[in-house]
Image (spheres, helix red, strand yellow):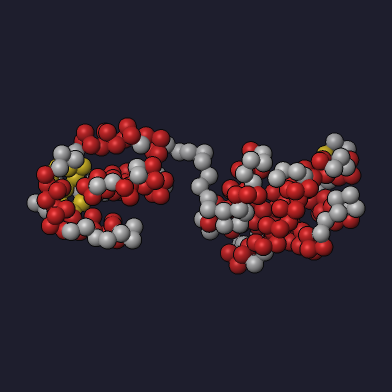
Amino acid sequence: MDKQVFLDESDFYNQLKIEQVKLLCYYQLSENGIDIFTISDVEDWFHGLSLPKPNKSRILEKVRRSKYFLKGTTDKSFRLHGKTIKDLNDSYKELQEPSDEIINYDTILPKALYENTRGYIERLAKQINASYESNIFDGCAVLMRRLTEVTIILTFKKLDIEDEIMNGDRHVGMKLLIDTAIKNQTLDLTTDSRKCIHKFRELGNFSAHKVYYNCKRKYIQEVIPEYRALIEELSHKAQLI
């Protein structure tokens, strides 16, 4: 269960304090198996969300009197009531199950470059962002290479010159694909794109094929502006945006 998604879905920040405590206890139970808690634990959870710590004596009294909680293993510990857990499980059942949703924050490719284009383009772009944000840099590099290849092919198709990148019934390899794109006058890439486009093939190739190589954040970080500009140019030429 993604914490931020859970907080958003439960409207956590607009809830009463006792409701917030209940929700945090449920999250800790669901994600970390913590079934017994103290008021000090509650303070730590609020602190972890960069929220003011609740008044200790006041929240202790509220928890003791609330129908949501039962006494724990000691006098100053508590646990969620079974009915409370069942009700919350029913309310947030969809968050307990694996989801196909790709959570990302547009670190590499902004939403304007992929939203309402094509479904597979959107998913590729989101995966590029999400993998970078999750420190999966080899995966990010391979996905960046793939999106570069896809947008080049879509551009050739849109310009009705796809036959120039075909080898029989298949598209040519990535190096020849890029070489053809650089030279093609109909495609007419900008000078900056012609200079940088091979970087993303090489970055992805290293991550996919070099045995002792691992991509690092800085390798991707330093080419993000060029990558955005390239994908934006190709997307315009392919009339995806």
Q: Position of residue 163 (x, y in %)?
A: 89, 40
Write the residue at 79% across / 51% down: 174
Asked which quadrant contains residue 57, the reply is bottom left
User: For the view shown, which residue lies furthest in the front direction?
Assistant: 14
Please state which of residues 125 and 202 is positioned toward the viewer in this rendering. Answer: 125
Q: Quadrant of the N terminus?
A: top left
User: Can residue 136 be seen?
Assistant: no
Please state which of residues 18 and 83 is positioned toward the viewer in this rendering. Answer: 18
Asked which quadrant contains residue 41, the reply is bottom left
Image height check: is 39 above or below 161? below
Judge left or right: residue 74 versus residue 137: left
Judge left or right: residue 188 versus residue 54: right
Write the residue at 65% across / 56% down: 141
Please state which of residues 1 and 108 is positioned toward the viewer in this rendering. Answer: 108
Q: Position of residue 154 (x, y in %)?
A: 77, 43
Image height check: is 98 above or below 175? above
Number of numbered discs on residues? 0
User: For the view shown, which residue lies furthest in the left direction?
Assistant: 75
Write the residue at 38% across / 42% down: 9
Write the residue at 85% across / 36% down: 169
Q: Position of residue 66 (x, y in %)?
A: 15, 42
Q: Position of residue 177 (x, y in %)?
A: 83, 50
Image height check: is 24 above or below 67? below
User: Can residue 161 be seen?
Assistant: yes
